[in-house]
Image: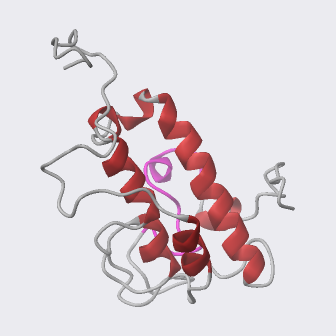
Amino acid sequence: LDSMGMPLPAGSLQRTLGRDPSATPAPTLPTPANVTSTLAIKPYDSANFSQMSIGFRGAAEGWNPYGMHNAVHVWVGGSMLPGTSPNDPVFFLHHANVDRIWNLWQKLQGGLGLGYLPVSGGPAGHNLNDPMFPWNTVADTSKPADLVNSLALGYKYDTD
C-alpha cells in the first residue's frame, strides 16, 4: 500500500523501512558503534564455516540473528527482501558500503587481500582458491583470491 493506503501496481518498488511487524527481532539499522565493534572482530571466519560460525563474516553478513548486511535488507524490507533485491536502487548503495567495511577490516588485518578464511578445508566453493559459483561452470574461473584486493581491481575508497 502507498502512503495513502492505496494498493500499488504489481511489480512496484516496495519498502517497509523498519515497519515490518513480521520481522523477528524487529529490524534496526546498523549504528556507527556496530561498525566499530564488527571491525574489531578476528578472525574473518571460523570452522565449520557455516551460517553460525563466529568471526567478522558472521557479524558483517548477518546470522547473529542479523548482522549488518542482512539487517539493512530486513529494515528496508519490501523489494529488498527477496532474491530480486537488486531491483531496488538502495541495494547498490548498501552493497558498496558492505564492500567499504570489508576493505576497512582487511586494512586493520595488515593489508588488502589478507585475512580471508577458509584458505582451505571449508565448504566447496568457499575456500580462497575455489572457483566461485555460478562461474565455476564456464571458462571463467574467478575465485575469492582474485577479488579480495580492491586496489588490484582498480578502485579504492576515500578512507584510503
Q: Which residue is rendered at x = 41% and y = 86% of the image? A: 54
Q: Is residue 80 above or below residue 25?
A: above
Q: Main secondary structure of the magenta part?
A: loop
The answer to whether one can see residue 129 in this image is no
Q: Position of residue 67 (x, y in %)?
A: 40, 67
Q: Position of residue 45 (x, y in %)?
A: 48, 83
Q: Is residue 113 above or below residue 10?
A: below
Q: Position of residue 130 (x, y in %)?
A: 53, 68
* Residue 31 inside the magenta-drawn segment: no
Residue numbers of the magenta segment: 125-142
Q: Which residue is rendered at x = 80% and y = 84% of the image? A: 110
Residue lying furthest front in this view? 4
Q: Which residue is rendered at x = 49% and y = 35% of the image? A: 90
Q: Which residue is rendered at x = 16% and y = 11% of the image? A: 6
Query: 51 or 105: which is nearer to us?
Result: 105
* Residue 135 inside the magenta-drawn segment: yes
Q: Position of residue 158 (x, y in %)?
A: 84, 53
Q: Is residue 16 above or below residue 26?
A: above
Quadrant including the N terminus? top left
Q: Is residue 152 above or below residue 88?
A: below
- Specify whether 52 is left or right of 158: left
The answer to whether one can see residue 144 in this image is yes
- Specify whether 44 is left or right of 100: left
